[in-house]
Structures are given as structure tokens and as C-alpha cells.
Image (cartoon, coloured by chain):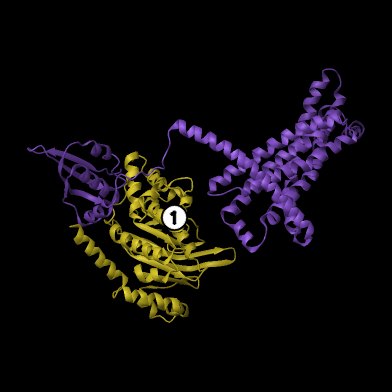
Amino acid sequence: MSKPVPGHDDDHQGDYPIVVEGLCNSFGDHVIHQDLSLKVKRGEILGVVGGSGTGKSVLMRSIIGLQIPDAGRIEVLGDDITAARDDDDIDIRSRWGVLFQGGALFSTLTVAENVEVPLKEFYPDLGGDLLDEIARFKVMLSGLPDEAAAKYPSELSGGMKKRAGLARALALDPELLFLDEPTAGLDPIGAAGFDELIGDLQDTLGLTVFLITHDLDTLYAICDRVAVLADKKVIAVGTIPELLALDHPWIQEYFKGPRGRAAQATQERVHAAPAGQVRAKAVDKRLKAGE
Amino acid sequence: MREWSDFTTTTGPDGEQDVALSGPLVVASVARIDPGLRAIEGRIARIDLSQVSAIDTVGAWLAFRLANRHGATITGASVEARRLIAAVGACPEETDITPPRAPLVRRVLDSIGDYVTASGAGSIAFLGFIGQMILAVCSMIRHPSRFRGKALVHQMELVGVSALGIIGLMSFLVGVVIAQQGAVQLKQFGAEIYTINLTGRLSFRELGVLMTAIMVAGRSGSAFAAQLGTMKLTEEVDAMRTIGVSPIEALVIPRVLACTFMMILLGFYASLAAIVGGATISTLTLDIPFMTFLSRIQEVVPLHDLWVGLIKAPVFGAIVALSGCYQGMQVEGNSEEVGTRTTTAVVQAIFAVIVLDAFFAVFFSEVGWG
């Protein structure tokens, strides 16, 4: 039962931690996904966009095994999720972290205790002191102030809840991070801070991030590639310039609409280079500083 | 097999120690070396990470903590390890992450004090709630169009019609037990025929209504508390207020009226079911024919027994509904409170019903309806 060492890819799945093929989902007569396919590359931040009701969250729930699809195959880190009928069959859950829309913190536990829950669940032999230390630096890594660790979720603001949820999602040092609208409902400054945090963490921890968002600024700021959900499937995956070259009406309206243009303009003002390059430079800078 | 990380310490001639960590230094593998690393005392000159096959933030934290406490320098770290150590190194080590906790004596006294003040505040809040109810009823009488007939009918279905099965079965079985156990005792002085009196009078006066009230408290009182509590948490109640809809009018009054009214019908229905149960067991074990049992009921049960039951029923129904709605509307904060408030609603309702039942028993005997 050894956990494959991060960074040492032991199988052909190394390049694509998430592979979705021919996914079909429906609720009653209402078809959500029809023959949907998607591959997520290792180490990238993949933004998933689409109009309301196109099944972005359902796609994420299918990938993490919360929603059993009608048909199709989903492989996460080499494990077939769709074949696992029981929750216990999915033994790769210690290798992913999930941030739900509202944070989904356990309301009767403090933030630090929330972070400790997955640690205790998967590694019961960790000592109490070490657990506390881990919880403390995870809370710090997710950008919360020190005193937040001792607070209960009901005492936190919406943005802090999301950060606390992120701290819990990062508790096990996952290779994969699923984020469901992380910046929805945050003020622009908080949202920008959250974008930066996710970008930094992705650089530092080498995460693969599956990010559902409506936030165009987030797409421009941190996403390496963007997958567009429409017409019950992924109609396009690529960098934003690649998507802009397509003439699908929804994509054009999405990126060329007033908000899309504004986000693009902001991005061009802040960074002359695309997001990926900017982040790569940031890593270099940090590395030099560390030496 | 899980691969564990390991460490070795070597003491140089100058008395300074070197610590070499090896194996995967990740969250899954560090549990066994952590106590050993904590136990190291004295100055450490160097911490060697060159034998570390993999590292994550937890491993980086261990290395950082060790270096920080013993003033050591880290050598042989990969680029990845340096990056992670720099990231976790910004963390203050001494922040308290547990909520502040007072000493035991203080906490006991605190909780007693909280309980007393909460009881006082609760009584006042309950009076306030009753007051709101009365105001809402008055304003509804003035504006009858605001009355929510549909909600009332819906609640009547949930409280009454859907409960018919379980309450019927329960009362039938209670009737069986009373008749059977009563017959065993009465047989000792050859008075089995009085089983009919026992079953009939007990069912109408006491058990039919009392058992129904307990069942309704468990079924509907709890549902009211949980529904309204969840609506409070999701801010539905606040949304109603801002639109100008009174939550008392829209949520509480239909529930209280439905429960009060349906308790009368359910109580009567339960009494009948208990008598049928008694009649059935008497037919089977006492050789009293079914129809004889029923016609004897008419002769031995005075009409005021029926009235006693029917007067108590709406009072019990109102208590169950008020308790459920009141506790639901008091929910604030988190989902745990929905649970505790629901429990409180049911416990309070059943307790109040039994206390009042005792009061009614004495009262009706005193007024000659014994």
C-alpha cells in the first residue's frame, strides 16, 4: 500500500492524472453530459468554464466519485473511478484535495481540527504535536491569519471559509486539487489574492489543479489551459489565445463580451506575458531568494 | 508495505551532532521518526537531506523545525526541498491553535450560569413568541385574505393524513396490550368482562390522546423544529422578512393550526383503533365476540370520557406545534444547533404534554367527570 512518490511517475498515467472518456450523465430525462471527454495534464491549472447548468460541478463530482455516471470511464491517477462502486474502493483519495463551493467545513470543529481530520483519517499514527504543527502551517500556507486556526467556521467570513477549506484540501499534500468556484462571492481584492495563492501553491507544491470558475480574471491570471463546457460536452480545450481563435459563438461571447475584454485588458496591464510564463518567473525568483 | 523514513545521528569530535535523514520524507512516512527527532538534544551542526528520496510540506516542516530549534544548517537539499522548506518556514511556531479553555471549575460554574441565564432568557423569548403569535392571529383576523389556506391544508396532510398508518397501528397494539394484560389481572376475581370497561375508558380518556400526542411530537414537532431551523440557517426566514412576509404568519400559524386541529381527529381515531385492538384480542383469547365487545363499549363508556379526550387533544397539539416552531425559530449559528433544538423541542413537548395530562386527570375528576 505504498503511496507513489510524488514527482516519480510510475506509470503511463503520469502525463495525464485525470482522463475522462465518453462520460454520460443525466438526471431523469435531463441529459447533462453526452459523450464528454477531457484530459488534464500533470502540473497544469485547468480552468473549466461554461454557462450555468452546463454541468461543471457535475463533471467534478463525477471525477471525484460523488456522482455515478450513466456511462463512460474516468481514470484519476491511474485508478478507474467509475469501476469503484463503494467509497472504500477509491484508495487514491489521500492523493487529492477538494475545495467545495461554500468551503464545506465541518461546522462543529475549529479550522485547525478541520485540517487534522484527513490527516487522522489516513495517517492515524501521526503524533498529536505533529498534527498541530501541520495544521498550523497549512493554515498559514492558505493565507489565513494565525488566530483563525482556533476559530469555528461560523466565526469566519466567506473568504476565510474558502481559505480554510483550501487548507483542509491541502492537508495531505495532494497531487491533485479540485476547486469549485474558489473566487465566487469574494471581493475583487480577496479574489485576486486567492488567485495568487493558488498560483503560488501550484508552483510550490507542484499541484495539478482542476478549477471550475466563472471568473474571467482568474482564467487570465492563473489558468494554463481552459476547457469550455457547452452542448453537453467539452467543446474546446486550450490556452486562451487558442480558444479566441475558434469561432464558436459561446466562446466568442464569453471572452469578447464586455467583462471578457475588461479582464483581458487588466491582465495585459499587469503582466506583459501570459500567466504560465509569469508564474514560471515567479518560481525562479523565489528559488534564487531561497538559496 | 509502506516505506518509512529514517534518520541517523553522528557526533563529531567537537561534540556537534550531524543528523542525516533518509527515505521518503512525506506525510505518510514520517510518523515513526517524529518522536525520535523531538528527543534529540543539544546543538546540531548539519542536517543532511541528500538521502531523502521524496519530500512534501510535512517533511519540509520536520526538517525546518529541527534546523530552527537546534540552530542547524540544512545541506544536500534538492531544489524542491529548498522551495518547500522556504514555504513552510514562514510559519510562526508558537501560535495557539486550540480555542482558549478556562480551568474546569470555572467552566462548570460558567455552564451553570449560562444555563440559568439561558433559561430565564428562554422563558422571556417564549412569551415573546406567544405574543408574536397573538399579534399575527389578530392581524390575520383583520385581513383574512392573508390567511394561508394552502399551507394549512398541506400541513394538515403532513401532520394528520400521513400519520394515520403509524398511529393506527400503534394504538391498535396498545389496545391489544391493555385488554390482554387487564384480562389477566381481572380473571383472578372472575371479572374478565370488565376488560371492556378498562379498554374503552382508558382509550378515550387517556391513552388514545396521550400516545397520539407523543407520536405527533416525535413525527411533526421534530419536523417543524428541523425545517424552521434549517430555514433560519439558510436565511430563508430573513428573506421572507425583507419581502414583507411575516414568518409567523407564513410558517408558524399554519403549522400550529394544522397540528391543533389534526390532533383532535387523530386522538379520536387512535381511541377507536385501540378499542378495535382490544376487541380483537378479546375475541381471540377471552371468547368475548367482537360485536359484543363494541356494543358493550357503548354501554360502559360515559359520553364525558369522549369529551375529556377531545378537550385535551387540541391543547396537546398546540403545545407540540408551538414547542417545535419556537425551537426552530431560535436556531442560530451552525447545523449542530438544528439537532439540539430539535431534540429540545421533542423533549419539552412530551414533558409538557404529560405534566398537563396529570393536571387534566385531577381537574376532570374534581369537576365530576370521573
Quarter holding the N terminus of chain B is top left
Residue B242 falls in which quadrant of the image?
Answer: bottom right
With A119 as the anchor, is B179 left or right in this view? Answer: right
**Which residue lies at the image location 61% right of the left edge and 42% below the top edge?**
B121
Say if B292 sits above or below A96 in the image.
above
In percent of width and height, residue B173 lies at 75, 35
Q: Is label 1 in a helix, a strand or a loop?
A: helix
Residue A150 showing in the rendered view: yes
Q: Which chain is purple?
A: B
Q: Which residue is mark 1?
A: A161
**Which residue lies at the image location 31% right of the left edge and 46% below the top edge?**
B28
Say if B62 sits above or below A30 in the image.
above
With B303 as the anchor, is B9 left or right in this view? Answer: left
Q: Colour of chain A?
A: yellow
Query: Local crowd at mark 1 within 10 Å, few (<14), some, or many (≥20)?
Result: many
In percent of width and height, residue B260 lies at 76, 46
Q: Chain of mark 1?
A: A
- A276 vs B89, nearest the viewer: B89
- A106 vs B162, nearest the viewer: A106
Residue A197 falls in which quadrant of the image?
Answer: bottom left
Say if A133 sits above or below B291 in the image.
below
Residue A80 showing in the rendered view: no
Residue B348 falls in which quadrant of the image?
Answer: top right
**Which residue lies at the image location 43% right of the left edge and 80% below the top edge?**
A256
**Which residue lies at the image location 44% right of the left edge and 69% below the top edge?**
A49
With B347 as the anchor, is A93 left or right in this view? Answer: left
Quarter holding the C terminus of chain B is top right
Q: Amino acid at mark 1?
A: Lys
